[in-house]
Amino acid sequence: MRGCGDVAVKQVRGERLVNKVLDTTVEELSRVGYETLSIEAVAARADVNKTTVYRRWPTKRDLVKAALERVARCQTMVPDTGDLRTDMLQHVSALRDDAESPALKSVIRMVFAADQHTELAQLAAHIRAEKELTARAMYQRAIARGELHPDTDIELVHDVLFGAIQHLVLFHPEPCPDTQLAQVIDMVLVSASSEMARRRPTLEPPPSPSMPRASRTTATPRSKKPRTSASSDVRRRPRRH
């Protein structure tokens, strides 16, 4: 009869196996891309029997989705320190540190470059939406504490912050230090505390102004010169006597 200890050891080994396969999936995805990726190649690189991988993830889409979701879970731990600026700094610092992995950075760039209709881009969009729901709680707590106005457009604040952070982390050749992250956060918070970050009522776009009609001016009729015959234009020569 197996004891509880044996079950626990098996679970630990199973968790390590899952993490190993998913980490290898991210590395292989960054190396060959989504279209070329295969479960057989992932299993070989992870030194795992391919039937073990197929049993848990029957399709390539299932495998890549699990790998990206695992990355997202590691990045969605939103701190709650009681201060919005500190929460934001800790959150983006963790995202910066996670993105320093060459494999993960390559995958993120690949997602940005992918056509929005591809399977990889659709998977990434689904995971990104879940992450944004988690991050939104950070701003909602700040509103409850009175750090942000209740009408603050938190989606806009979030997009501005993470758009800047992603650009600095992914596309700048130099590492992004904490001082630069703090500078971006301070700029975002200054804007968020102003009326520029308040929600605007959704208004229908104004009708496009019609092109003004050209004013018709009455042209002054040109005076017509009376036609003259060609012979009248020729000067008459004096007759010789």
Image: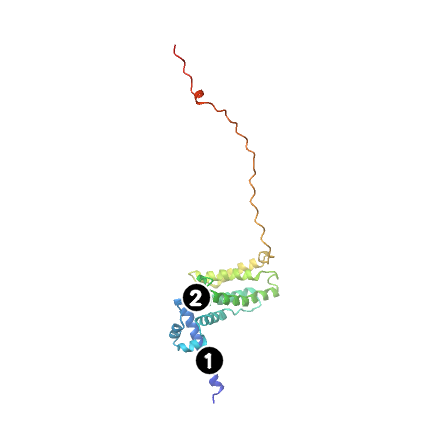
Quick one: which residue is furthest to the top in this view? Answer: 241
Tell me if mark 2 has few (under 14), some (14-19) or many (20+) residues whose alpha carbon lies within 10 angstroms of its own: many
Quarter of the figure that contains the C terminus: top left
Q: Which residue does the numbered mark 2 point to in the structure image?
A: 107
Which amino acid, by three-letter code, is at mark 1?
Val
Residue at the spot 43% in from the left edge and 76% down from the top edge: 54
Mark 1 or mark 2, whichever is nearer to me: 2
Q: Nearer the viewer, residue 158 or 226?
A: 226
On screen, residue 63 above or below 160: below
Give residue 107's quadrant in the image. Answer: bottom left
Q: Label 1 to label 2, Cα distance in Å?
A: 28 Å
Left/right of residue 200 with respect to residue 112 in the rendered view: right
The one nearer the camera, 54 or 99, is 54
User: Please, what is the three-letter code of the amino acid marked with disc 2?
Assistant: Val
Q: Is residue 126 left or right of residue 31?
A: right
Q: Position of residue 182 (x, y in %)?
A: 51, 62
Q: Categorize mark 1 by other alpha carbons within 10 Å: few (<14), some (14-19), many (20+).
A: few
Query: On the picture, is 147 further left or further right than 42?
Result: right
Task: Please name whichever residue, 26 or 40, is drawn nearer the observer in this view of the structure.
Answer: 40
Q: Name the one closer to the observer, 86 or 154.
A: 154
Where residue 17 appears, as percent x and y from the top left, is 43, 77
Q: In which quadrant of the rendered view does residue 204 lie?
A: bottom right
* Label 1: which secondary element: helix
Residue 44, image x, y percentages: 38, 74
Label 2 sits on a secondary structure element that is helix
Q: Residue at x 55, y 67 (%)?
A: 133
- The single residue placed furthest to the bottom in the displayed view is 1
Against 195, is 10 above or below?
Answer: below
- Tag 1 residue: 12
Residue 111 x, y percent position in the rendering: 45, 64
